[in-house]
C-alpha cells in the first residue's frame, strides 16, 4: 500500500503522536524498539466516525488496550506484525483487522509507511448495520476472528473506501461540509461491515439455504444468559428449539466453530474481565462463577487464549 492522501503534520515527539491518535481512536501505549521518532500524524472527524493516519519514523511497539464499547479497525500501510487474541499470533497480517474488544492488541507498524485507523462508537456501527439490513440487530454486534465467517465483500472494497475518504478530505482541506462528512462516514462503515467478519455477516450476504437466520442468534443470546450454569450443547439445542446436529451445523456454517467452543469463549471472556478488574475473589471463585467446573481445564484454556495463567493475570492487576 502507499501513503494515504491526507495532509499530515510532522512531529518527533512520541507523546504528541500518541495523544493525537488516542483522542480520536482508543487508549494505547507506545514503546520504541529502535531508532528515534520522526513521524507524522493526521486526524479527521466524520459524523461519528474518526480517521487517523500515523507513522512514527522509528521501530515502535503499539499496545492498544481492549476497545470495549468502541470499534477500531487498523489498516496497515506497510508490513505489520500483530499479536491479539482471535486476531493474529504475532505474524505479519495480510490486511485490515479489527482491534480486540476484550484483550490487548500489540502491533509493530512499518516505521515509514505507518497505518490508518478507523474508529467509532459501537452504537454508531450498529446504527449503520440496521440501515443496511432494514432491521435493528437482535443482539450486540460482535466482530469475529478472521476466517470465522465469510464476509459479504472482498477486501478491495474497504481499500477503495478509505482511499476515497482520504482523497476527499485532502480536496476539502480537511473541512468537508456536514453532508459530505455523513457520506464519507457511511461509506467507510458500509465497507467495514461488508469486508470484516462479524455476527451479522450472514444478514448482509444472505443466510445459508435452509438455515433460519435467527437460530444462531437465539443460541448466542441464551449462552450469554446461561453461561455460568453447568450447561451442555444439548441444553443449548433444546433451548433454541433445534436438534444438536442441526445446531452444530448452523454454528459452523455461520461462525466457523461449534456451540461448545463459543460457550467456552464466552466463559473465558467473562473470567478474563473479572480478573483484569482486580477484585479480591480467588481465581477458583472466578472460574466457578463463570461456569468452569474443572480448574485445571480452565487454567489450560485460559493460557491458550490469553498467553498467561489466570493467576498471573490476577496477580498483575491486583498489583
Image: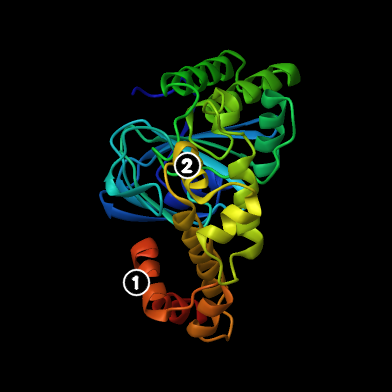
What residue is drawn where x is 52% and y is 86%? 282
Q: Given the current orientation, which residue lies at the most extreme front position?
A: 243
Q: Looking at the picture, how far across and down is residue 150, in whole percent? A: 44, 30
**Helix, strand or loop status at disc 2:** helix
Q: Quadrant of residue 230?
A: bottom right
**Helix, strand or loop status at disc 1:** helix
Q: Looking at the picture, how far across and down is residue 53, in whole percent? A: 47, 33
Q: Indicate left or right for 7 with 222 as reference.
A: left
Q: Looking at the picture, how far across and down is residue 283, in whole percent? A: 49, 82
What residue is drawn where x is 44% and y is 82%? 315
The tally of labels here is 2
What residue is drawn where x is 40% and y is 39%? 146
Question: In which quadrant will I find the N terminus?
Answer: top left
Residue 166 sits above or below residue 264 on the image? above
Near-viewer residue (242 or 148): 242
* Applied colour scheme: rainbow
Which residue is tagged 2?
Answer: 255
Residue 275 sits above or below residue 52 on the image? below
Q: Indicate left or right for 76 with 90 as reference.
A: right
Amino acid at each position: 500500500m502507499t501513503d494515504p492522501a491526507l495532509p499530515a503534520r510532522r512531529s518527533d515527539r512520541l507523546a504528541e503522536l500518541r495523544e493525537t491518535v488516542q483522542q480520536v481512536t482508543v487508549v494505547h501505549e507506545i514503546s520504541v524498539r529502535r531508532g528515534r521518532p520522526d513521524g507524522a500524524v493526521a486526524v479527521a472527524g466524520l459524523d461519528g466516525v474518526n480517521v487517523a493516519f500515523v507513522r512514527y519514523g522509528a521501530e515502535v511497539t503499539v499496545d492498544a488496550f481492549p476497545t470495549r464499547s468502541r470499534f477500531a479497525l487498523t489498516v496497515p500501510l506497510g508490513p505489520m506484525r500483530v499479536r491479539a487474541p482471535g486476531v493474529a499470533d504475532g505474524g505479519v497480517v495480510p490486511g485490515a483487522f479489527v482491534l480486540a474488544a476484550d484483550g490487548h492488541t500489540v502491533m509493530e507498524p512499518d516505521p515509514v509507511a505507518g497505518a490508518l485507523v478507523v474508529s467509532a462508537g459501537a452504537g454508531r456501527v450498529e446504527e449503520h448495520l440496521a440501515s443496511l439490513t432494514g432491521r435493528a440487530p437482535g443482539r450486540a454486534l460482535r466482530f469475529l476472528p478472521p476466517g470465522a465467517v465469510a464476509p459479504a465483500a472482498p477486501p478491495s472494497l474497504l481499500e477503495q473506501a478509505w482511499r476515497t475518504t482520504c482523497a476527499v478530505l485532502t480536496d476539502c482541506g480537511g473541512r468537508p461540509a456536514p453532508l459530505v462528512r455523513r457520506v464519507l462516514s457511511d461509506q467507510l462503515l458500509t465497507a467495514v461491515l461488508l469486508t470484516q467478519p462479524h455476527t451479522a455477516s450472514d444478514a448482509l450476504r444472505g443466510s445459508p439455504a435452509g438455515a433460519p437466520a435467527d437460530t444462531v442468534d437465539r443460541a448466542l443470546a441464551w449462552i450469554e444468559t446461561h453461561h455460568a450454569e453447568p450447561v451442555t450443547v444439548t441444553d443449548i439445542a433444546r433451548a433454541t428449539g433445534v436438534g444438536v446436529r442441526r445446531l452444530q451445523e448452523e454454528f459452523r456454517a455461520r461462525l466457523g466453530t461449534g456451540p461448545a467452543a463459543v460457550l467456552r469463549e464466552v466463559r473465558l471472556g467473562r473470567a478474563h474481565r473479572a480478573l483484569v478488574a482486580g477484585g479480591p475473589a480467588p481465581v477458583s471463585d472466578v472460574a466457578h462463577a463463570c461456569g468452569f467446573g474443572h480448574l485445571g481445564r480452565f487454567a489450560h484454556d485460559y493460557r491458550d487464549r490469553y498467553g498467561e495463567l489466570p493467576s498471573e493475570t490476577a496477580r498483575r492487576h491486583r498489583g
